[in-house]
Amino acid sequence: MNVVPIDILLVEDSPSDVLLTREALRDARIANDLSVARNGEEALDYLRQEGEHVGKPRPDIVILDLNLPRMDGREVLREIKGDDSLKRIPVIILTTSSSDRDIGECYDSYANCFLTKPIDFEEFIDVVRSMEHFWISVVRLPPS
């Protein structure tokens, strides 16, 4: 059986968190193609296939940090969910924040999930694996 990898856009400016997420996704052994945007503006260019991102695959899932340069994750989330051509893409917030205000604001802006990054390396790996298992193995994603 030929498995089609899921396309994931990780919007994250921390090189160490990008590396940890890549490792966790690789260890989960679920076929995926991970693309990385380092700031909010680059994420929107990628999603809208603008500039250097023309012809890039539309992601099946976006994993979004809130604390980003240029345009923060809250703004990116509002842009995605306010755009008829993008709003059906599930957006998973994966951030260091555990503030009730951030959680409420993200769900008010139609985030599909809010996860707080653990400090511990093994816990971080477990969070990414469980997120990937749920969103890839359990949930049916909308068609592109």
Image (cartoon, rainbow, N blue to C red):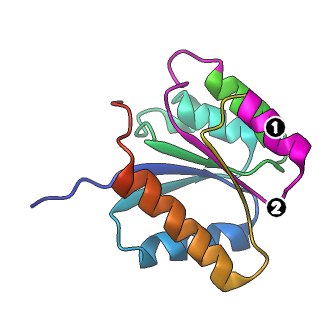
The N terminus: image quadrant: bottom left
| Badge 1 element | helix
Q: Could you tell me which residue is drawn at 56 percent across and 37 percent down? A: 46
Magenta highlight range: 82-108
Label 2 belongs to which residue?
96
Instruction: Please give the residue where the numbered disc 1 appears in the rendered image.
Output: 104
Left or right: where does residue 121 sit relative to residue 104?
A: left
The kind of residue on which mark 1 rests is Gly
Secondary structure of residue under mark 2: loop
Q: Earlier in the sequence, mark 2 or mark 1?
A: 2
Label pair 2/1, CB-CB below 8 angstroms: no
Task: Tell me if residue 29 comes above or below residue 6 in the rendering.
Answer: below
State whether residue 72 appears in this view: no
Residue 99 in the magenta stretch? The answer is: yes
The residue at the point 40 percent across, 57 percent down is: 33
Residue 114 percent location from the top left of the image: 69, 49
At label 2, the amino acid type is: Thr
Front residue of 10 and 54: 10
Nearer the observer, disc 2 or disc 1?
Answer: 1
Residue 126 visible at all: yes
Please tell me which residue is depicted at 73% across the width and 51% down the height of the picture: 65
- Rendering coords of residue 50 (x, y %): 56, 28
Residue 125 disc label: none
| In the image, farthest residue toward the left | 1
Q: Residue at x 53, y 60 (%)?
A: 131
Residue 136 in the image, given as x and y percentages of width and height: 39, 54
